[in-house]
Amino acid sequence: MPEKYPVLRAIVLDAVDARELAEFYRQLLGYRYRPGHEANDPSGDDWLVLDDTAGEARLAIQRVDQLPASTWPDASIPQQLHLDLTVDSTDDLVEQRDRALSMGATILEDRFDNPDEPLYVFADPAGHPFCIFVVPPRH
């Protein structure tokens, strides 16, 4: 009998302002609000789900009262997790860097010139680190 494994449903990020963070990732990733989560109703901003273009839940944002922003790479307030996002080329990386910055992200680390893996490490508006890097070619 084959083993059964749990299935990852979604990544959940905490945020003091769940709507703001959901909107950031909705725009960054091209996701859509789960039906019923799209209205800007303050009573419904405690838990917001973003679906991919196929309608699958990929990211959820949960409101919390307090959330100290990660100080990565300084370990005084460590990151709990981070998202790794990929693009196909350095041109795409520059384009996505500019998009992320225009939506409120900040650059934590610039490794654009790394010949093996060009990347940027950002903090989203709630302080969660995330990376965008160029996918290395498969051999």
Image (tube, rainbow, N blue to C red):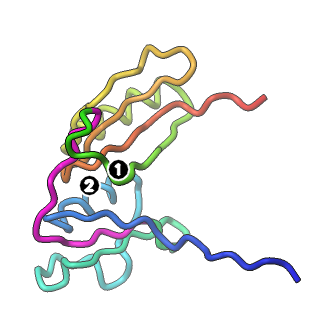
Which residue is at the front of the view, 119 or 71?
Answer: 71
Q: Quadrant of the C terminus?
A: top right
Query: Residue 95, located in which quarter of the rendered image?
Result: top left
Which residue is at the front of the view, 71 or 45?
Answer: 71
Q: Residue at x 47, y 44 (%)?
A: 85
Structural distance between the alpha carbons of marks 1 and 2? 6 Å
- Amino acid type at circle 1 is Leu
Judged from the image, the secondary structure of the residue bearing numbered disc 1 is: helix
Q: Residues within 10 Å of mark 1 (few under 14, many from 20)?
A: few
- Amino acid type at circle 2 is Phe
List the residue tagged with mark 1: 28
Query: Residue 99, located in which quarter of the rendered image?
Result: top left
List the residue tagged with mark 2: 24
Q: In the visual, does 64 lie left or right of 97?
A: left
Q: Residues within 10 Å of mark 2 (few under 14, many from 20)?
A: some
Point out the stretch of residues depicted in magenta: 59-73
Q: Residue at x 32, y 63 (%)?
A: 13
Furthest residue to the right?
1
Q: In the visual, does 137 lie left or right of 46?
A: right
